[in-house]
């Protein structure tokens, strides 16, 4: 922060793309307002300094996930990151695990293609009116809080190195939300083990740490799905049991 003409301003550096597909950071000075978040500063630049700046945002309430970006190299929601929590210069870039469309806009469309590959919910028929237990409600309710900001995908170092082989934490969470429903009849361990590449995940919990909804991605979804896949495909006792059938 600095003082200029009696006004407090913040220095913000924003990644800008160029016509040749490259890009770099450009510095701006933005006047500070109480309670300001990074999205406010970026929008100020777009509205008052350079209207060609490309950004994506919608609700400004941390509910849509649209304003996901990397703030000082950490995946965060711009609308949920207060200016007064950042020391020094602020640097904002698009999520680097995805291809850049323009400036701060990343192309996350690949996630919707992966989502279509996950075996869909297939409930069994109940002979009598069926009531779901509260423990089962709570187990899957957590996963449905996901706002699909894809920050977990962006921070995942396995995605960065093996994107073609691993679907990523967001999609393991989606599979877990279906697998843990007591009426579901599909075993998605084959999909996660083969097409999903869940074996690549080495459980660093970085995805869990950046989730704005506080979903325990690793503890409550990834570990369980990895164990299920390991039991089915790598348990020698299970192999022997199936051979005897």
Image (cartoon, helix red, strand yellow):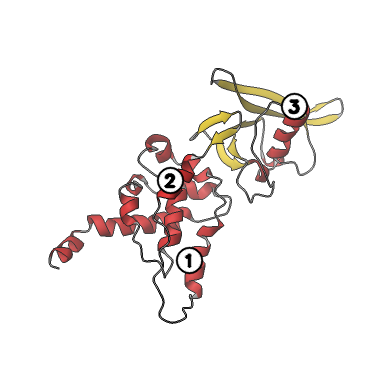
**Mark 1 highlights which residue?**
139
Q: Quadrant of the N terminus?
A: top right
Q: Earlier in the sequence, mark 2 or mark 1?
A: 2
Residue 165: name its quadrant: top left
Say what secondary structure mark 1 lies in. helix
Residue 28's quadrant in the figure? top right
Residue 1 against residue 187 in the figure, above or below: above
Could you give the CA–CA distance between mark 2 and mark 1, rounded to whole angstroms? 23 Å
Q: Between 194 and 201, which is closer to the camera in this rendering?
A: 194
Residue located beneath label 2 in the image = 114
Which numbered disc flags the more N-terminal residue, 2 or 3?
3
User: Is the Cβ of the residue at disc 2 closer than 8 Å to that at disc 1?
Assistant: no
* Residue sitting farthest toward the left: 244
Quick one: SS at disc 2? helix
Pointer 1: residues within 10 angstroms few (<14), some, or many (20+)? some
Residue 41 at x, y percent in the picture: 72, 35
Q: Are marks 1 and 3 in contact (CB under 8 Å)?
A: no
Measured in 3D between alpha carbons, the distance from the residue under mark 2 to the one under mark 3, in whole angstroms, is: 40 Å
Q: Residues within 10 Å of mark 2 (few under 14, many from 20)?
A: some
Mark 2–mark 3 contact, CB under 8 Å?
Answer: no
Q: Position of residue 106 (x, y in %)?
A: 55, 34
Q: Residue furthest right?
A: 6
- Front label number (2 vs 3): 2
- Distance from the alpha carbon under mark 1 to that under mark 3: 46 Å
Foreground label between 2 and 1: 2
- Left or right: residue 198 compared with residue 81: left
Would you say residue 57 is visible in this rendering?
Answer: yes
Question: Which residue is pictured at 37% across the width and 38% down the height?
Answer: 164
Residue designated by label 3: 29
């Amino acid at each position: 922060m600095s003082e200029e003409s009696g006004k407090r301003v913040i220095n913000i550096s924003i990644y800008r793309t160029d016509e040749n597909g490259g890009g770099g950071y450009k510095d701006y000075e933005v006047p500070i307002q109480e309670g300001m978040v990074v999205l406010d500063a970026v929008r100020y630049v777009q509205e008052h300094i350079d209207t060609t700046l490309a950004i994506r945002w919608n609700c400004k309430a941390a509910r849509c996930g649209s304003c996901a970006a990397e703030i000082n190299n950490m995946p965060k929601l711009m609308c949920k990151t207060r200016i007064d929590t950042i020391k020094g210069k602020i640097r904002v870039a698009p999520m680097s695990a995805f291809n850049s469309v323009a400036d701060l806009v990343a192309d996350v469309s690949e996630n919707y293609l992966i989502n279509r590959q996950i075996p869909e919910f297939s409930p069994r028929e109940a002979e009598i009116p069926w009531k779901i237990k509260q423990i089962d409600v709570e187990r899957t309710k957590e996963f449905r809080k996901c706002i699909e900001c894809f920050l977990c995908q962006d921070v995942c170092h396995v995605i960065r190195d093996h994107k073609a082989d691993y679907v990523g934490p967001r999609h393991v969470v989606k599979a877990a939300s279906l697998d843990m429903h007591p009426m579901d009849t599909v075993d998605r361990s084959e999909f996660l083990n083969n097409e999903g590449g869940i074996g690549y995940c080495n459980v660093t919990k970085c995805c869990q740490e950046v989730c704005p909804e506080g979903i325990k991605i690793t503890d409550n979804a990834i570990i369980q799905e990895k164990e299920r896949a390991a039991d089915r495909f790598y348990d020698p006792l299970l192999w022997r049991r199936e051979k005897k059938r």
